[in-house]
Image (cartoon, rainbow, N blue to C red):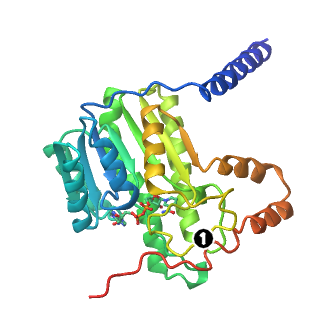
């Protein structure tokens, strides 16, 4: 009896949620008001982090900006002030260092208050074949792209759960859903970031903390410089994304409590195919889409010469 009732319930809810998702494709969703929130963005000294800060600048939030790059942070602070932000706090922080994350988190709590929107965005890439990547860089990639998320959650989630209010945003990558030739350490770190964010999201639901929203972002290449030199084979199908477009899509996802944001839409299709087609077919598809050669021309960010 229990089986019948539960199965019927899940079938009816499935139909309801599928219809709801379908209808949402055609209507403009209401955006939540974030005025008064304390928004922390890691990796805010450039790229997507800076653009997100600029997006939030007009929304009457307190902005807490973290980055290892102090000059970048100052430039972001200047840009958001110019846009009208009045409560802007920046901290030079190495997110890969657990003790430093905890220390600066305490400082933020004292000086600004409890963070209510946490955006884990800082990221790095080695861009070498796995056996050619140094142990130090492999470890660093995991520490910045994954473990920093653990420590920021540990630091800021208790206050959110205490009030059952907040938003956790994980800027991952499509490389956190599909493996890529030449990106083994990066893919591992992003798969882990996705798995972590997804699991904590479920933990929050299971413990009744439904006031804390979660958003996981998985974009394909973005034209910020991080993947300088990389090529896309079929730009119409898999375009290299413009940073401003990505930042606006992320903002929209946050303000409408969207749980997953994959960009471009082709990525949704690719993860469905990945789970359905035989391995040999997946390999052929990967070759067809250029995934075997994405990294052949990688240059990344060139270090400034002193
Ligand atoms: N650029 C892309 O093609 C692309 C694609 C998919 C996902 N992403 C992800 O989006 C996020 C933003 O990428 P982006 O393109 O803006 O990169 P970016 O290189 O322009 O910016 C990354 C920022 O993180 C900061 N950072 C690096 N190490 C840090 C550390 N240890 N502590 C604190 N800050 C640190 C950098 O100083 C920089 O300001 C990253 O997580 C990246 O992995 C990027």
In the rendered structure, the answer to whether residue 17 lies left or right of residue 186 reads right
Write the residue at 66% across / 72% down.
Answer: 181
Quadrant position of ligand 1: bottom left
- Is residue 155 visible to us here? no
In this image, 74 relative to 132: left or right? Answer: left
Q: Which residue is mark 1?
A: 184
Residue 291 at x, y = what percent? 69, 68
Q: Examine the rendering and report whether any part of residue 289 can be seen.
A: yes
Quarter of image, res 12: top right
Which quarter shows the N terminus? Answer: top right
Q: Is residue 128 left or right of residue 269?
A: left
Query: What residue is at 86 percent from the left and 57 percent from the top?
Result: 278
**Outermost residue toward the bottom in this view:** 306
Query: Which residue is pictured at 68% across the width and 68% down the height?
Result: 233
**120 left or right, relative to 57:** right
Image quarter in which the C terminus is found: bottom left
Q: Is residue 111 above or below residue 302?
A: above
Q: Count residues near mark 1 (Cα–Cα under 10 Å), then give few for <14, some for 14-19, many for 20+.
A: many
Where is residue 283? Give x, y as percent: 80, 66
């Amino acid at each position: 009896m229990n089986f019948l009732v539960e199965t019927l319930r899940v079938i009816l809810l499935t139909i309801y949620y599928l219809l709801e998702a379908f209808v949402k494709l055609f209507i403009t969703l209401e955006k939540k008001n974030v005025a008064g929130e304390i928004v922390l963005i890691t990796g805010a000294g450039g790229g997507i982090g800076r653009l997100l800060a600029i997006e939030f600048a007009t929304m009457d939030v307190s902005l807490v900006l973290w980055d290892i790059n102090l000059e970048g942070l100052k430039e972001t602070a200047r840009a958001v002030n110019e846009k009208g932000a009045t409560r802007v706090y920046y901290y030079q922080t190495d997110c890969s260092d657990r003790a430093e994350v905890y220390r600066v988190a305490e400082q933020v709590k004292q000086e600004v208050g409890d963070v209510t929107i946490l955006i884990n965005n800082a990221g790095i890439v080695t861009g070498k074949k796995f056996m050619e990547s140094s142990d130090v860089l492999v470890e660093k990639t995991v520490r910045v792209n994954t473990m920093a998320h653990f420590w920021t959650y540990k630091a800021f989630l208790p206050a959110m759960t205490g009030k059952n209010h907040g938003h956790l945003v994980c800027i991952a990558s499509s490389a956190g859903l599909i493996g890529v030739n030449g990106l083994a350490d990066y893919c591992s770190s992003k798969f882990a970031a996705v798995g972590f964010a997804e699991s904590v999201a479920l933990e929050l639901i299971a413990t009744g903390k439904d006031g804390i929203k979660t958003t996981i972002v998985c974009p394909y290449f973005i034209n910020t410089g991080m993947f300088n030199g990389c090529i896309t084979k079929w730009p119409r199908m898999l375009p290299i994304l413009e940073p401003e477009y990505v930042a606006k899509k992320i903002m929209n996802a946050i303000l409408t409590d969207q749980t997953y944001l994959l960009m471009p839409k082709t990525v949704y299709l690719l993860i469905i195919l990945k789970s359905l087609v035989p391995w040999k077919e997946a390999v052929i598809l990967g070759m067809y889409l250029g995934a075997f050669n994405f990294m052949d021309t990688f240059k990344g960010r060139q270090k400034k010469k002193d």
